[in-house]
Image (cartoon, rainbow, N blue to C red):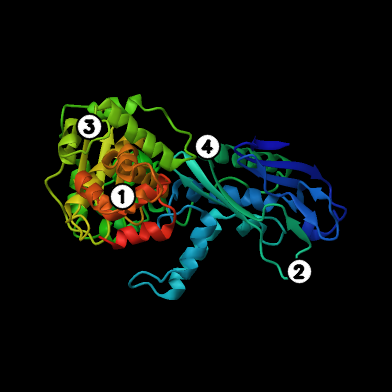
Amino acid sequence: MIFGDRQDFAVQVDRFDPPWPDLPAHEDAVWAATSFWVAGVNITEHRRNGTDRILDAVHMPLRPLAQWWSTMRAPLRFEERSQLGNLHSPHLELDRWSEALPPARVDDATWFDRRDAWWSRHFTGAATSDVIVPSVGIVRSDDRALVSWRVPTLARPDRSFVRSAGVATVSWPGVAAALSEFASTLSEWSPDVQLDEPTAHEGSPLEYYTGLAADELPSFGFWPQAATDPAVDPLAQVVRDLTHRTATSGAQRSIVEFVRDSRGSSSTEWWSARARLLPGDGLDLEREGYDAAQALRAWAGLDGQPIDDMEGLTRELGIDIASASPTSTADRMVVKGTAAGHASLMVLTTERTRTPWAKRFECARGLGHLMLDPLRGEAIGAASGPQAMASRRRKSGAFAAELLLPTSALMEASEGALDGITEGDRFGRLLNDYAVGAATAAFQLWNQGLLSSTEVRDNLIESR
């Protein structure tokens, strides 16, 4: 029996009766040969030590996994970030958390307790730790899910897995549907076991989604409907992307007023441009950003020339730029938009955004969010900073880089040669002509295959 789609996410089980049914520990157990599928890959394929035969499933009890999903359904649905914020792989995020120092006024014990709590909510290993099976990490990211897996480290393993670790981006609705169907079937097979979602959780949907504590929520004035579906509120989307320090700082009032301000330009050119973009598959985030920027340049008749006035272009597209610029230590920009076409952008004051080229980049990044971020409810809300959602940040960053410094300009400046940009003052002229920072230009050149090594890339950045 297969729950889900093996090309996306699935749990495949072949139930069997264990030979020890009379033992108390196994009296209500449901056992099966079980396979986990992620993006078309069977991650449970393994070879038992001493044989060459590849087995496609592991024998395991199913109830712990079904109970884990039923208990953790709410945090899996709403907690789209860790307290470190910006992740590409759940397992790598867990590793990074182990090495990261705790925030100010948080002691080591509390910091690791939070890490363990996050692990228990997002990793199947919390349910299957006593079984030799890859631990699967699942973290939602808008309409996608980041799924990673890793084989537990054992002193004397009796098997070797074909793919001991990996990560993939799959459909979040696909993951949720597969695990819900799996848990529902388990409740039929083992009717005495309670698998309903608990009525009380460690946190509320808004706490999971925004990373705020319960006593911090009232001061934001989130919409009532956000209590059960936080993402419908653009303010909740913005706060999810902000560092906790900025969200609860003196900038809070300005950010809330900015998001809640319903006044705006009557022009909705950005919405028309967004509607013309071809939807991506969510698998190559940078490619989606590059393609969208090239499409917008073509639509605006920009070809490969520099954009002299980024703020002017932003306003021409019907996006208001806030005059206020509250101070932040890390977060740089806030943007909001609605399906009605009203959109606004606010650049926060930081050491970085005091430079003209960085402010231009944040305007372009905000436009990238409006072009590419999925609607949640009828709204788009995002912020730019170290804890912004990785999928959105990568797309909007690639969009901004390509919009401000198109690949055609890189080819021309490099004269189509690998490392050609290092000749003479070509790199300096490129920065001046397109009003971009050295890091933006160097990474653009690297990402487009015009630099031979990371050393050449880093030397270009250090030269400015």
Q: Nearer the viewer, residue 30 or 377?
A: 377
Contact check, label 4 and label 3, Cβ < 8 Å: no
Q: How far apart are labels 4 and 1 at the CA level?
A: 37 Å
Q: Nearer the viewer, mark 4 or mark 1?
A: 1
Q: Residue 251: horizontal and vertical position, in percent?
A: 19, 56
Residue 321 in the figure: left or right of residue 177: left
> Reading the chain from its start, which is encountered first: label 2 or label 4?
2
Label 4 vs 3, first from the N-terminus:
4
Percent from the top left, x then y, of residue 78? 44, 47
* Residue at mark 3: 342
CA neighbours of label 1 inside 10 A, class few (<14), some (14 to 19), many (20+):
many
Residue on which disc 1 sits: 441
Three-letter code for the amino acid on which mark 1 is drawn? Ala
Give the number of the disc on residue 173.
Answer: 4
The Cα–Cα distance between marks 2 and 4, rounded to whole angstroms, is 38 Å
Q: Which mark is residue 156?
A: 2
In percent of width and height, residue 427 lies at 27, 51
Amino acid type, label 4:
Pro
Q: Sequence-wise, which precedes: disc 2 or disc 3?
A: 2
- 229 or 457, which is in the foreground? 457
* Residue in the image at 44% along x and 53% along y: 452
Q: Is the N terminus in the top left, top right, bottom left or bottom right quadrant?
A: top right
Q: Is residue 336 above or below residue 419?
A: above
CA gap, disc 2 and disc 3:
60 Å
Q: For the residue labelled by badge 2, is the local secondary structure a helix, a strand or a loop?
A: loop
The x and y percentages for residue 416 are 37, 41
- Tell me what residue is drawn at x 28 percent, y 42 percent: 405
Q: Quadrant of residue 308?
A: top left
Of residue 53 and residue 145, the one placed in the foreground of this image is 53
State how far apart marks 1 and 2 are (Cα).
Answer: 50 Å
In terms of depth relative to the viewer, which is nearer, 438 or 115? 438
